[in-house]
Image (spheres, helix red, strand yellow):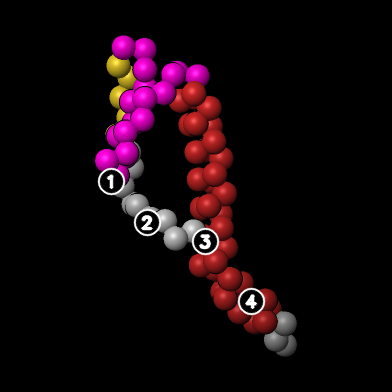
Amino acid sequence: MTDKKLYDQASHVAAEEGQVLVDGPDGVAVALTPDAALETAERLTAQAAQAAGQRHFEENKGKQAERYSDSKKP
């Protein structure tokens, strides 16, 4: 895992004058073309789904082993 700060607030996004403006935490501000914004959105969606799956797996790792061992009992 990286040493970067983890944020739980979504960035603010707006469309102005044919640009997509993203204002994020710690003063992050980005202006993207519509094409770049759409590609970024696709990448964010894919990686967010992967990260959610990783989190779910980690949170339930012990529970899965417990259920498996319980199912082996007579």
Q: Which residue is mark 3?
A: 1
Question: In the figure, residue 60 lies in which quadrant?
Answer: bottom right
Q: Residue at x 58, y 71 (%)?
A: 61
Q: Residue at x 72, y 87 (%)?
A: 74
Disc 2 from disc 3: Cα separation: 11 Å
Q: Which residue is mark 1?
A: 26
Contact between labelled residues 2 and 1, with CB atoms less than 8 Å apart: yes
The circle on residue 65 is 4
In the image, what residue type sits under mark 4?
Answer: Ala
Question: In the figure, residue 12 lies in which quadrant?
Answer: top left
Along the line of sight, the residue nearer the viewer: 9 or 32 = 32
Region of the chain picked out in magenta, as a range: 17-35
Q: Position of residue 51 (x, y in %)?
A: 53, 52
Q: Residue at x 41, y 23 (%)?
A: 32
Q: Nearer the viewer, mark 2 or mark 4?
A: 2
Q: Which residue is mark 2?
A: 5
Disc 4 from disc 1: Cα separation: 40 Å
**Number of residues whose C-alpha sits closer than 10 Å to that of mark 2, classed few (under 14), some (14–19) or many (20 or more):** few
Q: Nearer the viewer, mark 3 or mark 4?
A: 3
Q: Position of residue 52 (x, y in %)?
A: 51, 53
Along the line of sight, the residue nearer the viewer: 33 or 61 = 33
